[in-house]
Image (cartoon, rainbow, N blue to C red):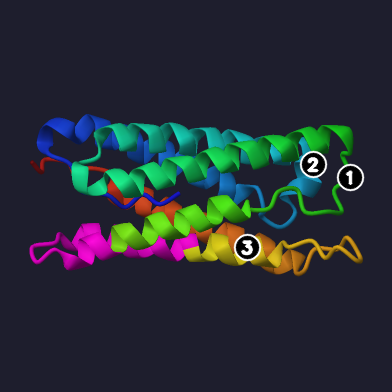
């Protein structure tokens, strides 16, 4: 999810590239998973597996990012990492539920409310940190802004996918899917922006 921290020093370029690629793969999984017609094409179990695999890539990238982060970014990256762990649990639960009941006329996965809240907090901290720097890099500002937007979309998806207790229906299935896809697209853009530029120290 939020891929918004500092553009690293030249000697950290390889690590930054790994983080960006891992986030990009995870983002792609969350972009494909809710895509209209995908679950009909591959089935509920395979669709849930795509979400779960994506969450593993996110957590791996978040862990590497936490280990590489500066003291100023440590709290935000830690919050992000915990958020990804919540998504690991929710996507695994969705995968197990899909194995038990492979019907496709339901929401395969919905963003975890706590995980989404942690992403929003992490994204807001990163955005504020970048905005407060006088000599901020414009690319870092773009990464922080697009990833905060992705966090907002994931939060909207968590709200839209709320299950109404009286009926068992999802509040707005279409909005939940589109918000998840748009959030993932934002995270993918942030991942690609994070990739170190060739020939630049």
**Considering only order in the chain, which callout, 1 or 3, is on the residue closer to the N terminus?**
1
Asked whether the viewer can see residue 135, the reply is yes
Q: CA distance from mark 3 to mark 1?
A: 21 Å
- The answer to whether residue 73 is magenta is no
Within 10 Å of disc 3 (Cα), the crowding (few <14, some 14-19, many 20+) is many
Q: CA distance from mark 2 to mark 3?
A: 19 Å
Within 10 Å of disc 2 (Cα), the crowding (few <14, some 14-19, many 20+) is many
Q: How many marks?
A: 3
Which residue in the protein does label 1 denote? 103
Q: Quadrant of the C terminus?
A: top left
Judge by depth and name the residue closer to the eye, 159 or 50: 159
**Considering only order in the chain, which callout, 3 or 2, is on the residue closer to the N terminus?**
2
Q: Residue at x 58, y 52 (%)?
A: 114
**Above or below: residue 148 compared with residue 102:** below
Q: CA distance from mark 1 to mark 2?
A: 7 Å
Label 2 near label 1: C-beta < 8 Å? yes
Which residue in the protein does label 3 denote? 157
Please, what secondary structure does the residue beneath circle 2 have? helix
- The answer to whether residue 142 is magenta is yes
**Considering only order in the chain, which callout, 2 or 1, is on the residue closer to the N terminus?**
2
With 175 as the anchor, is 125 left or right in this view? left
**Residue 11 picture quarter:** top left
Please, what secondary structure does the residue beneath circle 3 have? helix
Which residue in the protein does label 2 denote? 44
Judge by depth and name the residue closer to the eye, 29 or 78: 78
- Name the main secondary structure of what is drawn in magenta: helix
**Residue 196, percent from left and from top:** 22, 43
């Amino acid at each position: 999810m939020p891929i918004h921290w500092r553009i690293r020093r030249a000697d950290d370029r390889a690590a930054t590239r790994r983080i960006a690629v891992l986030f990009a793969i995870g983002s792609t999984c969350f972009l494909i998973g809710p895509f209209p017609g995908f679950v009909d094409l591959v089935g509920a179990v395979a669709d849930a597996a795509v979400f779960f695999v994506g969450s593993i890539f996110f957590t791996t990238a978040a862990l590497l990012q936490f280990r590489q982060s500066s003291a100023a970014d440590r709290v935000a990256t830690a919050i992000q990492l915990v958020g990804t762990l919540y998504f690991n649990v929710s996507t695994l639960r969705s995968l197990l539920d899909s194995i038990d009941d492979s019907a496709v006329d339901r929401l395969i996965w919905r963003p975890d409310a706590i995980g989404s809240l942690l992403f929003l907090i992490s994204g807001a901290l990163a955005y504020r940190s970048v905005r407060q720097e006088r000599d901020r890099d414009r690319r870092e500002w773009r990464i922080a802004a697009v990833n905060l937007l992705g966090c907002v979309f994931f939060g909207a998806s968590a709200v839209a996918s709320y299950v109404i207790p009286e009926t068992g229906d999802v509040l707005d299935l279409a909005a939940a899917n589109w918000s998840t896809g748009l959030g993932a697209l934002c995270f993918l853009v942030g991942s690609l922006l994070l990739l170190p530029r060739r020939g630049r120290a």
